[in-house]
Image (cartoon, helix red, strand yellow):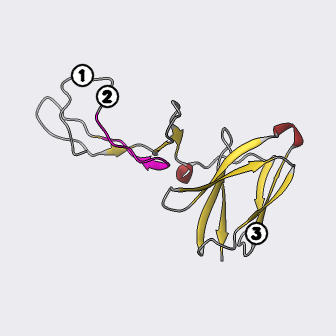
Amino acid sequence: VGWTPTGDTLLSWVHTGLSLVDSQYYYFGVRARNRAGLIGPETWSDGILYVQGTSTPLPSPTLSSERVPTLRVYPSPAQRMVMVECLREMLPLKGYLINSEGRILRSVDLDASETSIPTESLSPGIYWLWFPPYAPLSFFRE
């Protein structure tokens, strides 16, 4: 959607009629116009993941810098697999394998405090394992 005038002193806005694609990130940009008509610089959201059938938007993993010390992924770089470790009290965890374009490649379920995830089918690059509500964990596939 292109830049859309929304009126003066607007604090929220809803755009309907969108055809969103499941498991895609969407970004929202805003720019302000002052009373003299000058337009300021644009500012963009971190991204919102649209997952069909959910009502809670999921934040983009690409900009999160938080790390949870009780949840980790190794080795990085990876070749045939990565290991995910977590505390037993956190189980079970449902998460997602996400590529550098923000696409969900597959769901990942953790039922044990140490789980291996195959990476042989992945192209070389950066990936994220995200187990909401925890911050995404990145790894590099050689």
Mark with earlier residue (3, 2):
2
Q: Which residues are magenta?
A: 17-29
Q: Please tell me which residue lies in front, 43 or 76.
A: 76
Q: Which residue is tagged 1?
A: 9
Mark with earlier residue (3, 1):
1
Spot occupied by residue 117 in the image (x, y as percentages of width and height): 75, 62
Which of pointers 2 and 1 indicates the residue nearer the eye? 2
Mark with earlier residue (2, 1):
1
Spot occupied by residue 85 in the image (x, y as percentages of width and height): 83, 53
Which of pointers 3 and 1 indicates the residue nearer the eye? 3
Of the numbered discs in the image, which one, if any, rests on residue 14?
2
Q: Which residue is tagged 3?
A: 81
Q: Please tell me which residue lies in front, 56 or 59.
A: 56
Q: Residue at x 36, y 42 (%)?
A: 28
Of the numbered discs in the image, which one, if any, rests on residue 72?
none
Tell me the quarter of the picture where residue 32 sits. Answer: top left
Q: Amino acid at mark 3?
A: Met
Spot occupied by residue 47 in the image (x, y as percentages of width and height): 45, 45
Note whether 21 is above or below 13 in the view shown.
below
- Dominant SS of magenta comes to loop
- Which residue is farthest left? 36
Q: In the image, is residue 99 part of the stretch drawn in magenta?
A: no
For numbered disc 2, what is the local secondary structure? loop
Within-10-Å neighbours for mark 2: few <14, some 14–19, many 20+? few
